[in-house]
Amino acid sequence: MRASYGPVLWLLAILALSAGCLASHRLMATYSAAPGPSLRPGTVQLLVQDRRGEDFLGPEAQAKKVFAASSDGRLDLTAKNPDGSQLLLSDLSISKLVWEAVRRNLALTGVTAITGVTNAKARVTVVVEKMSLELAGREVIAEVRLSANIDRPGLPNSYQTRGYGKASRTNLIGDQGGAAALSEALTIALNNLNFSGLDNFQ
C-alpha cells in the first residue's frame, strides 16, 4: 500500500509558515515599573542619549541569528504598572524604549516628563551606556547599563544616578530566553535609577 504524504507535507508547510511569522517579530522587552518615593509634582524635560559602543546583539548571537528580527536594535516593549495595567508599544529604537520606560517610572512618583522645555523645571538626561544580548553556550546573557544626570539650565550643580542590570536564561526555542533575560536586566537597571535628586531642582 502506498503511503500518503499529503497530510504530512501540509502540516510541515503550516509549521514552516508559522515559524516564518514568528521570526519576523521584534524581541519583546517587558519593563515592570516599581513605585519609588513620591517626589514634588512637576514637569521635567526628559532626554535619552544612546551612547552604546557596540551592537545590541553580541558576535555569537549575530552569527547564530537567534534574535535576527532585532539585529538592528529595534524592540517591542510591554510596560507594566504596579496596578496591573500595561501598555504595548512596537518597533522602538533603544533610545525611544528607554525614554518611554523612564517616563512611566517618573509618572509613578508624580513627575511628568516631556520632550520639550515648556514648563519644565528641570532636565533629566539618561544615557544608554550598554544594552546587549549575547549567547554563551546554552545561555543567553543580557546586560543593561544606564546613567542619568539631573540639572537645571542656569544652575551650576547637578545630580547623577546609575543603574545596572544583568540576567541570563537558558536559550529556548525562538526568542523566549532572550526576552526573559532582557526584561529582567532592563527592569533592574531602570528601577535602580534614583530620581530623588529632582526635588532639589523643581
Image (cartoon, rainbow, N blue to C red):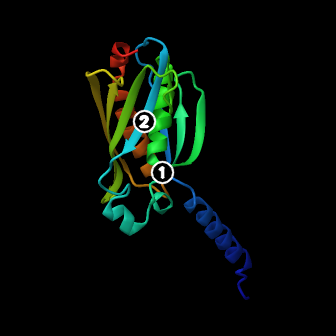
Compare marks 1 and 2 and give the one earlier in the sequence: 2
Q: How far apart are marks 1 and 2 (CA)?
A: 30 Å
Placement of 64 over or under 142, stated as above or below? below
Whether residue 72 can be seen here: yes
Asked which secondary structure carries label 2, the reply is strand
Mark 1 or 2, closer to the camera: 2
Q: In which quarter of the image is the N terminus?
A: bottom right
**Dot 1 corresponds to which residue?**
176
**Dot 2 corresponds to which residue?**
47
Placement of 113 over or under 99, stated as above or below? above
Whether residue 33 can be seen here: no
> Residue at position x 59%, y 64% from top?
19
The number of numbered badges drawn on the structure is 2
- Three-letter amino acid code of the residue under disc 1: Gln
* Relative image position of residue 49 (x, y in whole percent): 38, 42
* Relative image position of residue 110 (x, y in whole percent): 49, 16
How busy is the neighbourhood of tag 1: few (under 14 within 10 Å), some, or many (20 plus)? some
